[in-house]
C-alpha cells in the first residue's frame, strides 16, 4: 500500500521534534472533519507547517521567541520567494567580522579544553549577517523569514549533540563547512492562521478551536538523556539570542543567557518533582491544561518515561474527557498500533515510546 504523502516541513534539530509523527497526527485528525487546530507547544513548528499545508486553519503557539519567528515565516508570510532572494544573496556575500557571537561562541580548538558550538569562520559570518538583518529595518514578518533562514543555516554547521547545553569535544565534521543561507520553500500564506508566543495557560482562555494538539515537554527520545533534564529554554538559548541579538548576560560553561536559567524560565511541564499530595507537578499542569482547553477534541503527545508518570496520566485523562483512541508509534517498523488503555499497558516499562491520545471533551 502506498504511504500517503504529507507536506514537507522545515526545522532545526530539536529534542522532542514530532517530525516523524506528522503522518500519524494527520491520519488521526483527518476523519474528524475539524477545521481550526491549535498547536499549543509548537517548538520547531513542523506540526503547524504540516497542518497548514494540509488545509487546516492553524493557531500556533510556543513560549519560545525563535519558535514564534519560525511560525511567522511559515504561517504568516505573504511575500513570494523572489522578494527575499536578493537579500539572501547579499547576506551570503558579506565578509565575516569579529563581533559578540564570535567572542562568546566561536572557537578553533587552539585553546585546550575549549568547547564551542561553532567554528570561527561561521560565527564571523553570523556576526556580519545578524547585524545586517537589523540594518535592513524590515517589517516583522519579512525579518522573521531572514532570521529563520539564518537559524536553519547555523543549525547545519553547529558542533553539538543537538542542543546548546553542551558542546562536542571534537569538532563535528559539519562544523568545518561554511554556512550558506538558503531560502526555505515559502508558500505565501493563504490561510487564516494565528501565531502566539504565550505561556499555554495565558493562551487557552482566549482560544476556541475544533481540535487542540498538545506536545508539552515530557521528556526526550534520546535514551541517554533522562526526561527530567530536558529544559527547553536552557537547551535552545542560542536561538533566542540569535533572534533577539540583545547581547545578554551569560552564565555557565556553555554561555547560557541569564533568563534561560531554570529559575527564570520555569515551566511546570518540565518539573519532575511531586507536590505535597505526591502527584507529579507536570501532570497536574497537564490536567489543568486539558480542563481549560476550549475544543471538542484534544490530541495529546506523550513520550513515556516511566510507569508512575503513565498511571498519573491515565487518571488525569479520565477526569477531563473520554479517550477515543490511543496509539503507539513504532518508527522502526513504520507502524501505528492502536492500544487498549489498560493497567497492563500502564505497568509496562517501556521508556521513550511515543504515544498519541485522542480525547473527546
Ligand atoms: C516537546 S516540545 C514541542 C515540539 C514540537 N511539537 C515539534 O515538533 O517541534 C515542547 C515545547 O513546549 C514549549 N513550552 C514549555 N513550556 C511551555 C509553556 N508553559 N507554554 C507554552 N510553551 C511551552 C517549549 O518551548 C518547547 O518548544
Image (cartoon, rainbow, N blue to C red):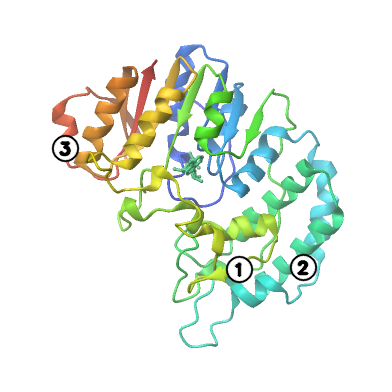
Q: Which residue is drawn at 32% across and 36% down?
A: 283
> Contact (CB < 8 A) between labels 2 and 3?
no
Q: What element carries label 2?
A: helix
Residue 199, compared with residue 300, is above or below; it is below
- Quadrant occupied by the C terminus: top left
- The first of marks 2 and 3 along the sequence is 2
> Contact (CB < 8 A) between labels 2 and 1?
no
Q: Which residue is drawn at 48% across and 88% down?
A: 112
Marks 3 and 1, Cα distance to the nearest angstrom? 45 Å
Give coordinates of residue 296: x percent, y percent: 45, 14
Give coordinates of residue 7: x percent, y percent: 58, 31
Graded by Cα atoms within 10 Å as few (under 14), some (14 to 19) or many (20 or more), the crowding at tag 3 reads few
> Contact (CB < 8 A) between labels 3 and 1?
no
Label 1 belongs to which residue?
A: 249
Q: What element carries label 1?
A: loop
Give coordinates of residue 331: x percent, y percent: 35, 39
Q: Which of 199 and 227 is in front in this view?
A: 199
Label 3 belongs to which residue?
A: 348
- The first of marks 3 and 1 along the sequence is 1
Give coordinates of residue 179: x percent, y percent: 66, 64
Label 2 belongs to which residue?
A: 128
- Quadrant occupied by the N terminus: top left
Amino acid at each position: 500500500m502506498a504511504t500517503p504523502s504529507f507536506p514537507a516541513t522545515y526545522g532545526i534539530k530539536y529534542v522532542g521534534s514530532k517530525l516523524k509523527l506528522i503522518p500519524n497526527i494527520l491520519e488521526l485528525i483527518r476523519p474528524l472533519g475539524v477545521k481550526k487546530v491549535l498547536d499549543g507547544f509548537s517548538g520547531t513548528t513542523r506540526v503547524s507547517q504540516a497542518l497548514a499545508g494540509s488545509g487546516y486553519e492553524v493557531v500556533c503557539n510556543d513560549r519560545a521567541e525563535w519558535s514564534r519567528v519560525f511560525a511567522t515565516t511559515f504561517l504568516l508570510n505573504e511575500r513570494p520567494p523572489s522578494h527575499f532572494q536578493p537579500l539572501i544573496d547579499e547576506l551570503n556575500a558579506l565578509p565575516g567580522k569579529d563581533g559578540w557571537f564570535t567572542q562568546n561562541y566561536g572557537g578553533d580548538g587552539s585553546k585546550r579544553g575549549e568547547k564551542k558550538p561553532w567554528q570561527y569562520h561561521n560565527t564571523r559570518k553570523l556576526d556580519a549577517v545578524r547585524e545586517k538583518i537589523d540594518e535592513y529595518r524590515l517589517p516583522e514578518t519579512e525579518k522573521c523569514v531572514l532570521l529563520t533562514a539564518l537559524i536553519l543555516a547555523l543549525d547545519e554547521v553547529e558542533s553539538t549533540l543537538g542542543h546548546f547545553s553542551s558542546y562536542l569535544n571534537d569538532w563535528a565534521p559539519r562544523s568545518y563547512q561554511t554556512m550558506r543561507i538558503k531560502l526555505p520553500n515559502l508558500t505565501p500564506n493563504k490561510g487564516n492562521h494565528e501565531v502566539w508566543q504565550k505561556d499555554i495557560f495565558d493562551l487557552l482562555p482566549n482560544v476556541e478551536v475544533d481540535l487542540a494538539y498538545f506536545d508539552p515537554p515530557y521528556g526526550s527520545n534520546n535514551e541517554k538523556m533522562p526526561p527530567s533534564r530536558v529544559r527547553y529554554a536552557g537547551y535552545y538559548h542560542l536561538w533566542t539570542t540569535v533572534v533577539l541579538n540583545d547581547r545578554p548576560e551569560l552564565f555557565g560553561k556553555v554561555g547560557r543567557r541569564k533568563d534561560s536559567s531554570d529559575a527564570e524560565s520555569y515551566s511546570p511541564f518540565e518539573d519532575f518533582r511531586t507536590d505535597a499530595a505526591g502527584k507529579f507537578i507536570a501532570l497536574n499542569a497537564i490536567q489543568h491544561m486539558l480542563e481549560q482547553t476550549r475544543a471538542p477534541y484534544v490530541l495529546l503527545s506523550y513520550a513515556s518515561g516511566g510507569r508512575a508518570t503513565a498511571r498519573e496520566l491515565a487518571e488525569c485523562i479520565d477526569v477531563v474527557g473520554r479517550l477515543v483512541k490511543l496509539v503507539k508509534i513504532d518508527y522502526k517498523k513504520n507502524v501505528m498500533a492502536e492500544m487498549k488503555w489498560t493497567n497492563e499497558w500502564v505497568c509496562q516499562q517501556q521508556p521513550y515510546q511515543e504515544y498519541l491520545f485522542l480525547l473527546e471533551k
